[in-house]
Amino acid sequence: MKKIRIKAKEKEGIVKVKVLLTHEMLTYNQAKKRGVKANFITRVIAKVGEKTVYELSSSQFLSKNPLLKFKFRGNKGEVLEIAWIDLSGAHASASKMIK
């Protein structure tokens, strides 16, 4: 199951975000041992409206079910959208209102 859990809280104009991405993150070495294709998250993007507040391009270095933390300037009541795409082209997205 591919899902995203988001916590976003604003304090004094700064939004602190914690994001848990559920993904197996199968590296090239692990995939070779199992006889399957490697598959890991290659891109994560976070937006508030049309504004990109966080962007990550990654490789196989992320752990299984990675936890990401970041901060940005924002306000309570705005909607934070998080999306990722993996090496196979699969993707997931979720949104959460900032508290």
Image (cartoon, helix red, strand yellow):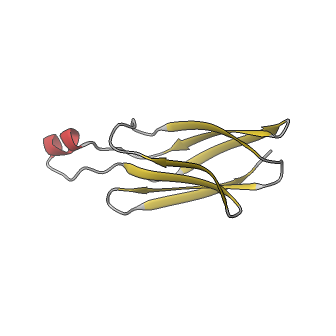
Left or right of 29 on screen, residue 91: right
Left or right of 12 on screen, residue 30: left
Which is nearer the eye, 8 or 55?
55
Left or right of 37 on screen, residue 23: right
Write down the quadrant of residue 45 in the picture: bottom right
Write down the quadrant of residue 81 in the picture: bottom right
Residue at 39 percent of width and 62 percent of height: 90
Residue at 63 percent of width and 45 percent of height: 6
Residue at 62 percent of width and 38 percent of height: 70
How many marks the image carries: the answer is 0
Q: Is residue 22 above or below residue 89?
A: above
Left or right of 96 on screen, residue 30: left
Q: Position of residue 97 (x, y in %)?
A: 75, 52
Q: Position of residue 9 (x, y in %)?
A: 76, 39
Q: Position of residue 19 (x, y in %)?
A: 58, 42
Which is nearer the eye, 35 or 63?
63
Q: Position of residue 66 (x, y in %)?
A: 47, 38
